Image (tube, grey):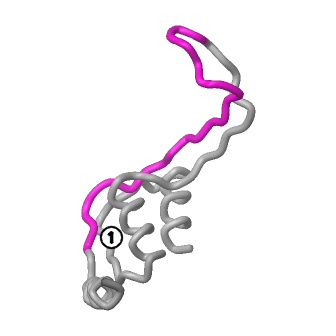
Amino acid sequence: LIQFLSNLLIDHMSRRVICFGAAGIDYISYVSNYPKEDDKIRAIDSFICGGGNAANTSTALARLGIETSLISKWGDDPNGSIVKNELIN
């Protein structure tokens, strides 16, 4: 079983994945508890980071050592700069 999984991993790592789709911004907020229906609560902390299905998938695969490319677009504005910089780094 270990040999099979090892060969499978090597086989998958020799392939290239091209992701095509969204690269955007995620707004993440931390709250002290999960809100009930129609509740209004304050965030404890929040941050902004790159997101989007294709960008997230491409990043995750690259971190696993799989060669990836991303075909997407983003705006020429501050949010677009966040996406671009996070993908480069």
Percent across and percent down for residue 62 are 42, 76
- Is 13 on the left-hand or right-hand side of 84? left
User: Of all residues shown, which one is farthest toward the front?
Assistant: 1
In the image, taking residue 72 as reference, residue 56 lies left or right, namely right
Q: Residue at x 50, y 45 (%)?
A: 26
Location of residue 65 in the rendering, given as x and y in whole percent from the top left corner: 43, 82
Residue at horizontal 63 percent and vertical 36 percent from the top: 29
Closest to the observer, 76 or 39 = 39
- Report x, y in % for residue 10: 32, 90
Q: Is residue 10 magenta?
A: no
Within the image, what quadrant is residue 57 found in?
A: bottom left
Q: Range of the magenta residues?
A: 18-39
Residue 18: image quadrant is bottom left
Q: Give x and y (percent) for residue 79.
A: 52, 50
Q: Which residue is mark 1?
A: 70
Q: Is 10 located above or below residue 57 in the figure?
A: below
**Vertical position of residue 80 compared to residue 30: above or below:** below
Judge whether 70 appears above or below 33 on screen.
Answer: below
Q: Classify mark 1: helix, strand or loop.
A: strand
**Quarter holding the C terminus?**
bottom right
Q: Quadrant of the N terminus?
A: bottom left
